[in-house]
Image (cartoon, rainbow, N blue to C red):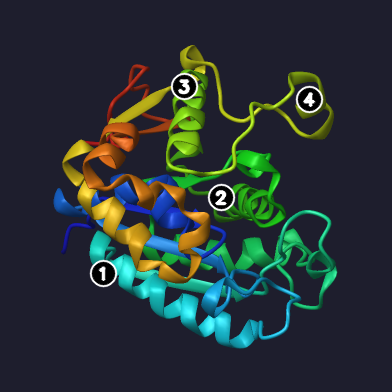
Amino acid sequence: MVERPLTLMAVHAHPDDEATGTGGVLARYAAEGIRTVLVTCTDGACGDGPGGVKPGEPGHDPAAVAAMRRQELQESCDVLKVSHLEMLDYGDSGMMGWAANDAPGSFWRTPVEEGAARLAELLHRYRPDVVVTYDENGFYGHPDHIQANRITMAALELSGMTPKVYWTTAPRSMMQRFGEAMREFGADWEEPDPVEEAEVMPEIGLPDEEITTWVDITEFGSQKFDALAAHASQGENIFFLRMGKERFTELMGVETFVRVRDTTDAAVPETDLFAGLR
């Protein structure tokens, strides 16, 4: 009887999300011999086209963008040594309030039960020990990120499985450093007005003391950088690439999560998604 390998499953919304929030842990755990499974929910068709052309502008071909981003996603997975890539291929819903939210086939418009049933099949196939996705606000309010959270949590209920479950997050102590780095490298960043921000969406990230899991991925910073760089068509939106690998790794050398489901009773804060499992 073959022993089942320890398995990490990351559920993301678009091509390139895997590198931004979990590129480090995907690379780290692959290097440790853990099977890594990436589920990407949408085709990314609302991303930039060649030359940075935006959705709705002349020359933006959603089908061509989706095909290009699929190729970039595979390149990123190769860099991160992802064991298995699964694409649900729902339509990219665009940002909140876009017409694409309600387009036929969009992920945002898809019934949660439908997406959950498809994801539950993958849960049964791979039987992950750890599942990672976004929080209930999709980290920053993106409809596809919110929907990824919804189908993941519903799929877990449907499957009856009990892996450790984590939501990606960022420590509030880091947000100021991010803002400083963005301004330094020419990104358009203004400190948000706390009152206005609270009216629009919950504050991004969590107080440091509420973060349960801090994973050091410094050794894999170069892979994470290269995985982001594989998504060259979206380079305008990935300001981190302007930093160079050394500064990037310095800023992005720890990936943080909040543990929302657990049966191991591993003590928190923890430094390993697989604490209590090995």
Mark 4 residue crowding within 10 angstroms, few (<14) / some (14–19) / many (20+): few
What is the distance, in whole Å, between disc 3 and disc 2 at their CAs?
Answer: 22 Å
Q: Distance of mark 4 from mark 2, alpha carbons?
A: 30 Å
Between the residue at mark 3 and the residue at mark 4, the CA separation in whole angstroms equals 21 Å
Task: Give the residue type that dot 3 points to.
Answer: Ile
Q: What residue type is labelled 1?
A: Asp
Is the Cβ of the residue at disc 3 closer than 8 Å to that at disc 4? no
Query: Which callout, 4 or 1, points to the residue nearer the camera?
Result: 4
Callout 4 secondary element: helix
Under circle 3, the secondary element is loop
Residue tagged 1: 78
Residue matched to label 4: 198
Task: Specify which label sits upstream in the sequence, 2 or 1.
Answer: 1
C-alpha span from label 3 to label 1: 30 Å
Q: Name the residue under label 2.
A: 156
Q: In this view, does 68 lie above or below 31?
A: below
